[in-house]
Amino acid sequence: MFKNVFGSGFLVRTAHVILTWVITLILFLHDTELRQQEETGQLVQPVLFVLLVLGSVLLYFAVSLMDPGFILSEDRDLQFTLGVTEEQQDMIPPTTKSLRQRRCGHCLLQQPMRSKHCQTCQHCVRRYDHHCPWIENCVGERNHRWFVLYLAVQLLVLLWGVRIAWTGFSAAPSWQQWLRSDGVLLAVATLLALLSLVVLLLLGSHLYLVSLNTTTWEFMARHRISYLKHCGADENPFDRGTFHNLWGFYCVWGTVVWEQVYFREGSDQV
């Protein structure tokens, strides 16, 4: 289920963890409300903040090391023809004839619908979304919901960190003296604000795509994807409505046979 901790992403993960705890330490060492509450014995907010930071780090490692849905061998029970009748196969337009036998040219395994080969991970991934250099892992069928949860928790940590850093700024007679006393805190607050913006945009885009039951790869490259390029610009064969899309994403566990969803949608439109 989990990959080797000391794989190619070891340096990325180490840098992430070190940066996280260094920033947390700076927020405690400067005269912020965290330090003031710690000194006066009011430990509720400091403890909650540390627990939230710890939770974000644990989620980061879970998403980073989790199997995103690698296809390591051909599963005969999940091949393309499962649940699809011969009549439905005959309904496939000529432009999508390659859907009948779609085999990866790199790992030579038959690819289920919505899967894609990742050049970085060197594996095909079920319901491939994208390869994230931040976690040094693919985001796919098994870890996508955890990736979105991680983004939400990380955003809370970053925004809370910006607020804490703001409480540590103090007045000074001149800009030079202020920069000497609060320069490090200013750099931390700026970094946290920029990261907050990036994570907010990522979280918003993923929630939007999830509500449509589409992936980043399908959204960006639908004109090159065999099972989508014949569809209209606003047509998504996997869209079952916002509620059902969100319910299926967060509450339905296990492998989904997307071929059944694809042909069921096509049958409803005929």
Image (tube, rainbow, N blue to C red):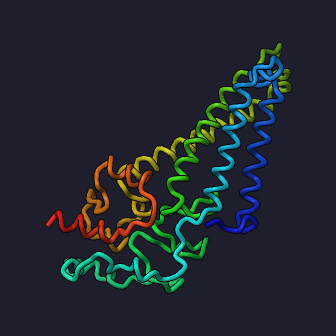
**Horizontal side, residue 197 vs residue 264: left or right:** right
| In this view, 249 is above or below 93 | above
| In this view, 217 is above or below 42 | below
Q: Say which of 145 and 157 sits in front.
A: 145
**Horizontal side, residue 229 vs residue 21: left or right:** left
Which residue is drawn at the image coordinates 76% and 60% (left, top)? 11
Indicate the quadrant containing the N terminus: top left, top right, bottom left or bottom right.
bottom right
Single out the residue that lies furthest toward the left: 270
Estimate the x, y position of residue 227 in percent, counting from the top left: 32, 72
Total residue callouts: 0
Which residue is drawn at the image coordinates 59% and 41% (left, top)? 153
To which quarter of the image does residue 249 belong? bottom left
Indicate the quadrant containing the C terminus: top left, top right, bottom left or bottom right.
bottom left
Which residue is drawn at the image coordinates 80% and 26% (left, top)? 182
To which quarter of the image does residue 44 belong? top right
Which residue is drawn at the image coordinates 21% and 67% (left, top)? 266
Estimate the x, y position of residue 6 in percent, counting from the top left: 76, 66
Q: Say which of 202 and 80 sits in front.
A: 80
| In this view, 105 is above or below 230 | below
| In this view, 209 is above or below 109 | above
Estimate the x, y position of residue 243 in percent, counting from the top left: 33, 46
Estimate the x, y position of residue 169 in percent, counting from the top left: 75, 21
**Horizontal side, residue 40 vs residue 123: left or right:** right
